[in-house]
Amino acid sequence: MNTFEAVRVVAAREIRVKLRDKTFLFSTVFFLLFSVGATLLPVLLGGGPPSVAVVGAAPAALGAAELDVRTVADEATARAQVRDGDVDAALLGDGTVVALTDAPSDLVNALSTRPTVELLDPSALDDTLMVLVPMFFALIFFFVSLMFGLQIAQSVTEEKQTRVVEILAAAVPVRVLLAGKVLAGAVLAMGQIALIAVVALAGMRVAGPADGGLLTLLGPAIGWFLPFFLVGFVMLAALWAAVGALVDRQEDLSGASMPVQMIVLLPFFGVAMFSGDPAVMKVLSYIPFTAPTAMPVRLFQGDAAGWEPVVSLVLLAVTALGVLLVGARLYEGSLLRSNGRISMASAWRDREARRLADLDAESA
């Protein structure tokens, strides 16, 4: 069995285990329901356009407004429908507006003479979206990468604790085990992110024409978020696997994983605090550990040139390759050691000693 087949077998095993894991299934359903709720609930709870009972011919001004206009025979019928809750408001023949408790702003605005409005910055984003969209990208990257990263670390530690890793290492090289775990985690995480993206975009499309502008703005940002997330997750996955190999008890995992958890927290807090500062966001979009969230946010805000995400993604990929090599060395240097928690320095030196021993054995 060649290396590619061995990696595929290890990855397939990890994927099968995770697909039966209730935590993974619950988190997937939760994120999908969250995406559906965020896009469809505002429309569903809105209850459709306001309904208006009109006595006689409806004024031309109501034609351009999003109102459910219903023609009635006389004022008594109009008042009765408002009182019974059949319509939200009524427009009488003399121009009087009838409502039950509150003045119907939609109908009043449609009948009012509105001044001409000149927008100096018509492309400016809504203040609420300027806060919610960066938080959405940051939360997705934070929770998904943290959840799948911890699962990779827990899987490695569990195999060490039960001594299963010794059997696996005798069958396939240690780096193959690492590659299989990283590949499986990336496939599952990317699949979950892709599902969230599809559901969110579909929800915005179903929500109606009012969200057409938001869909146009979010589409490119989500499209770039997917490759940024994939490369960023692979970069972190090797570190999570190395952290799992540094300990041989699940109880010690939280302490050993604290440095990696802080790296995962950086994008969340960085984007959450500085999403409104273009200068800081530009810097964050080129730092590998914050680029997966900062660059899609800048694309949504319209602050990034067309070449910037390409350069940022290349920098992220180069950094990911370097981190993978570091994580692989720590993983190999600590996976087969079961004498308690191992420091990163000891794992690094042990891997070098193992490499020199292998070279001596080959030369002999």
Image: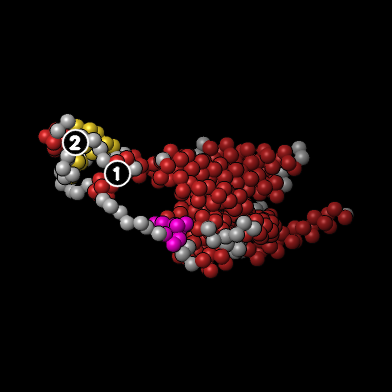
Sequence order check, earlier mark of 1 and 2: 2
Give the CA distance from mark 1 to mark 2.
15 Å
Amino acid tagged 2: Val
Foreground: 94 or 161? 94
Q: What residue is disc 2 on? A: 55
Q: Secondary structure at mark 2?
A: strand
| Structural crowding at the residue carrying mark 2, measured as other residues with C-alpha within 10 Å and reported as few (<14), some (14–19) or many (≥20) | many
**Secondary structure that dominates the magenta span:** loop
Foreground: 286 or 18? 286
Applied colour scheme? secondary structure
Q: Residue 294 location in percent, x, y?
A: 54, 59
The residue at the point 48 percent across, 67 percent down is 277
CB within 8 Å, label 1 to label 2: no
Q: Residue 42 location in percent, x, y?
A: 35, 44
Q: What residue is disc 1 on? A: 61
Q: Secondary structure at mark 1?
A: helix
Amino acid tagged 1: Ala
Mark number, residue 176: none
Task: Classify 136 as above or below 286.
Answer: above
Considering every residue shown, the one lying at the far right of the view is: 364
Q: Residue 236 location in percent, x, y?
A: 60, 55
| Structural crowding at the residue carrying mark 1, measured as other residues with C-alpha within 10 Å and reported as few (<14), some (14–19) or many (≥20) | few
**Total tally of numbered discs in the picture:** 2
**Residue 62, quarter of the rendered image:** top left
